[in-house]
Amino acid sequence: MRVYMLRRLLLAIPTVFLVSLIVFFMIRFIPGSAIDAAVVRMGMVGGEMGAVTPGENCGRCW
């Protein structure tokens, strides 16, 4: 049982490393972001629905 647990723990290290690499590269190379998708989904593109343009004071939004 000890050998089994040791083997499973040692196999977990490269597994976690590979999964973290896959996630990192997917985040870096897939275009867009979750924020961009949420903004488009809510229809806040181009200053609609109270979206703040870069020159406005954001304190007024809240």
Image (cartoon, rainbow, N blue to C red):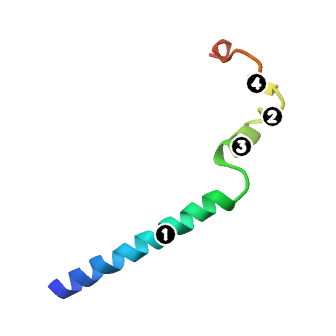
Relative side of 40 to 27, left or right: right
Q: Would you name the residue on which mark 2 appears?
A: 45
The image shows residue 48, relative to residue 42, as above or below, that is above
3 and 4 marks in contact (CB < 8 Å): no
Q: Secondary structure at mark 1?
A: helix
Upstream in sequence: badge 4 or badge 2: 2
Kind of residue sitting beneath label 1: Val
Mark 3 or mark 2, which has the lower sequence index? 3
Q: Indicate the quadrant where residue 39 lies.
A: top right
Marks 3 and 1 sit apart, C-alpha to C-alpha, by 25 Å
Q: Which of disc 1 and disc 2 is earlier in sequence?
A: 1
First reached walking from the N terminus: tag 3 or tag 1: 1
The mark lying in front, picked from 4 and 2, is 4
Which of pointers 3 and 1 indicates the residue nearer the eye?
A: 1
Gap in angstroms between the C-alphas marked 3 and 4: 16 Å
Q: Residues within 10 Å of mark 3 (few under 14, many from 20)?
A: few
Callout in the foreground (3, 4): 4
Residue 40 vertical placement versus 62 (above, below):
below
Find residue 19 and name its label: 1
Q: Neighbour class for label 1 at 10 Å: few (<14), some, many (≥20)? A: few
Q: Do the CB atoms of the residues marked 3 and 2 lie less than 8 Å apart? A: no
Task: Locate residue 15, reporting x and y percent.
Answer: 42, 75
- The numbered disc on residue 36 is 3
Q: How would you rate the neighbour count of disc 2 (Cα within 10 Å): few for under 14, some for 14-19, many for 20 or more? A: some
Give the amino acid type for the residue marked by disc 4 in the picture: Pro
Residue at 62% of width from left, 16% of height from top? 62
- CB under 8 Å between discs 4 and 1: no
Q: Which residue is mark 4?
A: 54
